Image (cartoon, rainbow, N blue to C red):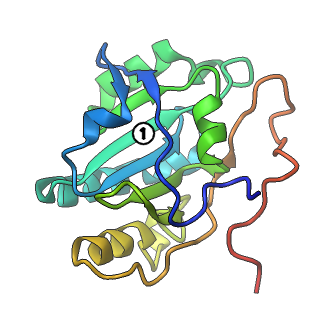
Amino acid sequence: MAFTLELGAPAPDFQLPATDGRTYALADFAEAPVLVVFFTCNHCPYVIASDETTRATVEKYQPRGVRFVGINSNSRHTYAEDDFPHMVRRMAEHRFPWVYLRDETQQVALAYGALRTPHFYVFDAARRLVYTGRGLDNPREPAKATINDLENALDDVLAGRPVRVPQTNPIGCNVKWEGRDKHWMPPDACDLVPPR
């Protein structure tokens, strides 16, 4: 079985605390025609550099009913700044337009098979996976990006057509797994798209 959630698979449920003081489950987003779940964090340079691009995407697609859920699963023992208090502080400072959840046990990251930060998952109205992978082809230097795969996928699913490029390799720092070296990846984790 693949480590990362496979195309067509249902969205795994979750029940996680958010920086706004609430706890959210998958059902809380049931009214959205499209749901974007993405794994992110506080410290990763790829996340920090591309956050404003993600903000622009959220602001572009939220009026069309798309909901966005960011999840931080990184071990706070690897990077202390990835703990929940720092999440609250970061959201207060930047006021990002998405729900920001804490996956302390990393069980949600395992259920989705999150590989890197950021790693995006797009689900259709039936909550089946229609896209997984990167947002931009250059999240570290968004000004040099040539493709926004996340927006292309959202355009396709909102138009009711199959996503033209349903899988890309996420680009960023690996998820920081509890009790492991900061560069460790699960042995069954692999690229979603083979190198050419």
Taking the spot 56% from the left edge, 51% from the top edge, the residue there is 46
Residue 131 location, x and y as percent? 47, 66
192 left or right of 121 in image? right
Tell me if residue 127 can be seen.
yes
Q: Nearer the viewer, residue 182 or 162?
A: 162
Tell me if residue 97 can be seen.
no
**The N terminus: image quadrant:** bottom right
Circle 1: element type: strand
**The C terminus: image quadrant:** bottom right
Amino acid at circle 1: Gly
Taking the spot 23% from the left edge, 54% from the top edge, the residue there is 66
Residue 124 location, x and y as percent? 33, 61
For mark 1, what is the residue? 70
Residue 88 location, x and y as percent? 39, 18
Q: Nearer the viewer, residue 77 or 46?
A: 77
Q: Nearer the viewer, residue 9 or 181?
A: 9
139, above or below 25, in the image:
below
Task: Judge the density around disc 1: few (<14), some (14-19), many (≥20) Cα neighbours within 10 Å.
Answer: many
